[in-house]
Structure formats: C-alpha cells, structure tokens
Amino acid sequence: MTNREALMTAVKAADDKKAENIIVLNMVGISLIADYFVICHGNSDKQVQAIADEIRDRLDEAGYEVKRMEGYDEARWILVDIGDVVVHVFHRDERNYYNLEKLWGDATVEDIKKELGI
C-alpha cells in the first residue's frame, strides 16, 4: 500500500464515522515526521474514539500497520501513527485550542473532495 492509499483509507474511514472538517496537510519537505497529516474532529469522546477505531480497523483490513495510537483513553486528541501518515483525531474543543492548521500553515492543503465524492 502506498502512502497515498494509506492516507485515503484513513480519510474515508474518518468520513464514514462523520468526522468533521477533515483536512490533509502535505508535509513533504516541511516535516521529517510524516509526509501527510490528517486533521479532523468529533463532537464527543465516544465519537473521537469511534473515528480512531474505524481508521485502525480499515488500515488493518487493508494490510497496513498502525504503528502506534496515543491518547485513546482520554479521547481529547488521538494520534494515529501509520508511518508516513499521521492522523490527528481531536475533540472539537481541543482542535480549536491547538489549531494545528495554523501551526503548520506553510503546508499545502490537499484537495480530498473528489476522493470523498463531495
């Protein structure tokens, strides 16, 4: 599975669990951590956990290894590390507070609307 396939698997899984305001940042040449950051949020602890669970399950089904998942029990900011793709699943309040989109404002925002059928 390519980075792009892993990315889109995670994005579609988040979308299927009604994650809000899904944004993909292209981090190539900006960060050594990952090629892509996915940022999204849910409106409750349970929804945040459901989004992270769905991402993990879909990636497992596709044969891609989830290297690590952090913050699951608190469900305020769950980080799903799948190598060159890092997914940040926030609770709405924490997303507004940390504002990663502004922090990484020099990253290009990927257009994912076509892949999501929007």
Image: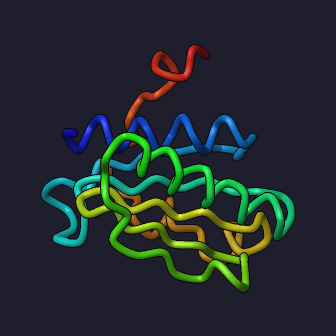
Q: Nearer the viewer, residue 118 or 5?
A: 5
- Looking at the picture, does residue 25 appear above or below residue 110? below
Residue 42 picture location, percent across and down:
76, 57
Q: Nearer the viewer, residue 112 or 57?
A: 57
Q: Residue at x 46, y 53 (%)?
A: 38
Q: Residue at x 43, y 38 (%)?
A: 9
Q: Is residue 115 left or right of residue 40?
A: left
- Looking at the picture, does residue 61 appear above or below residue 72? above
Q: Is residue 42 left or right of residue 21?
A: right
Q: Is residue 12 left or right of residue 66?
A: right
Q: Residue at x 47, y 16 (%)?
A: 114
Q: Is residue 93 left or right of residue 58?
A: right
Residue 63 picture location, percent across and down:
31, 46
Residue 1 picture location, percent across and down:
22, 39
Q: How many marks?
A: 0
In what quadrant of the picture does the C terminus appear?
top right
Q: Nearer the viewer, residue 27 or 65?
A: 65
Residue 110 picture location, percent across and down:
38, 36
Q: Where on the picture, by quarter, is residue 35?
A: bottom left
- Looking at the picture, does residue 35 appear above or below residue 109? below
Q: Residue at x 52, y 81 (%)?
A: 70
- Looking at the picture, does residue 10 appear above or below residue 52? above
State how the image is colored: rainbow
